[in-house]
Image (cartoon, rainbow, N blue to C red):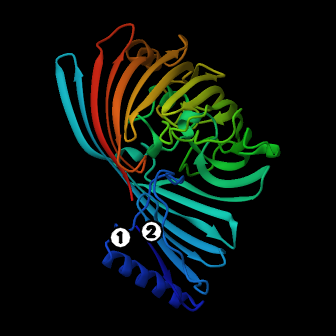
Amino acid sequence: MHSLSVVSSPSLRSLVLAVLLATSSAQAQGTPEAGAAGPSAVPPQAPASAGSSAKDSPVTVTAAPGRGLLVKTADERFSLGLRARAQFRDTFVHSGDTDTNELQVRTLRLVVHGNVLVPELRYNIQLAFGGGDFERDSSSPIFDAFVEYTRWRDLNLRAGQFFVPFDRARTIREFALQFVDRQQVVRELSLDRDVGLMLSSSNLFGLGDRLAYNLFIGGGEGRNRFGAQKLGPLAVARLTLRPFGAFDDDQEGDLSREKRPRLAVGFAGARNLATHRQNSTYGTTLALGTTDYTNAAVDVVFKYAGFSLLAEGLWRRANVNSLQGTTTSGAPAQEWTRSGYGYFVQGGLLVHPNVEVVGRWEQLFARRDTDPQFVQLAETQGRQVAGGVNLYVNGHAFKLQSDYVRVFGHSGTPRHFVRLQLDASF
């Protein structure tokens, strides 16, 4: 890990030369290849860059494992950061008499981030290139693309495409998960990403970060949707209470092992009007019309001395069970909406500063009058029990994860997953 300083003229040509010279110098000294972590949040476990720049240096270039490369002017009016993240996964599945194995690059992320004009005016662009990152009917690699202004404590502004501020388990960045993948309940009932405007504060009224809020209004059709749609916005409100003050509730696990109780309780509600998506902001595109969805969530995060607990309940209801219409040939057609609810409880314990054991239980329920495929999913695969072991080489920024998941229901054949994954941020 190295921190480098370069003296240059204010001209654009000199700025570019400074970056190139600093990068070459870092490689010559053994600095890890410049890259970036996938999510917009920086893994706090990654060590900070060492060293200091000369007072008269207009440009500094720093690099650190898990944090990537950062170019910043001395007056802090401009900065440009690059981070990369890769996820390599091996999945073995046993179901009945069938065994399968899949070895893949699960995801590959690139993030460009920084500030412009003033330190409080920030930007973030995250691109995803893994095979599972693309939506079925969209070839765009854009995950996040937003600007935000954070000057005022009680009113931060963000505009663009990003996670809808609904439930805690979905807004926790993928690099900071305790298990190889997210909970099935969250993948089915959350709101994922959308394009819109968010008002927020993590320290409302200056109460020591004990009270936070998010207000969001967006298009309601999800990420990377192109073409005009019937007007029908998505509105979300979320309130978070932290009785003991601020802590890293946006990451799973308790890698800091602080010997003080930390608690966050969140409540959220959402209303999505006239959406064309079967899962509100994602999923199959409905061709026969639109539906209105109402969502609710409650979540709890607790941490103490290496122990962590994350629990969440989610509920979603459509205003109609199905849409009726005709195909282009005039034949009758029907499309279903998906209404249901579910919950999960997940815990972890650091048995060594770098080793964690984790466990999880979850259950998904579908309304009887909703999509028959959703009903079947809940009946045959609606329950999951899982356990795993994580080795943290550099916190969440570089870790080896392994887990076992049993997927079952009231009927059907249980399935067993064994997964091994390397998650590396550069």
Name the residue: 52% across, 15% down: 366
Cβ–Cβ below 8 Å for labels 1 and 2? Answer: yes
- In the rendered image, which residue does mark 2 sit on? 63
Residue 33 vs residue 90, the one in the foreground: 33
Callout 2, which amino acid? Ala
Residue 227 is situated, as x and y percent measured from the top left of the image, at 58, 51
Q: In this view, does 119 lie above or below 188?
A: below
Q: In which quarter of the image is residue 220?
A: top right
| Front position in the image: 81 or 220 | 81
Q: Which residue is drawn at 49% across and 51% down?
A: 43
**Residue 287 visible:** no
Please give the name of the residue rendered at 30% of the width and 41% of the height, measured from the top-left corner.
421
> From what the image shows, is residue 53 above or below residue 245?
below
Query: Relative to residue 162, is residue 34 drawn left or right?
Result: left
Q: What element carries label 1?
A: loop
Q: Count every numbered label the image shows and give the total.
A: 2
For label 1, the crowd category at 10 Å Cα-Cα, with few meaning under 14, some 14 to 19 and many 20 or more, is some
Whole-percent x, y for residue 274 in the image = 67, 34
Marks 1 and 2, Cα distance to the nearest angstrom?
8 Å
Rendered location of residue 243, percent (x, y): 71, 32
Query: What mark, if any, has residue 31 been given in the picture?
Result: 1
Farthest residue, direction top? 410
> SS class of the residue under badge 2?
strand
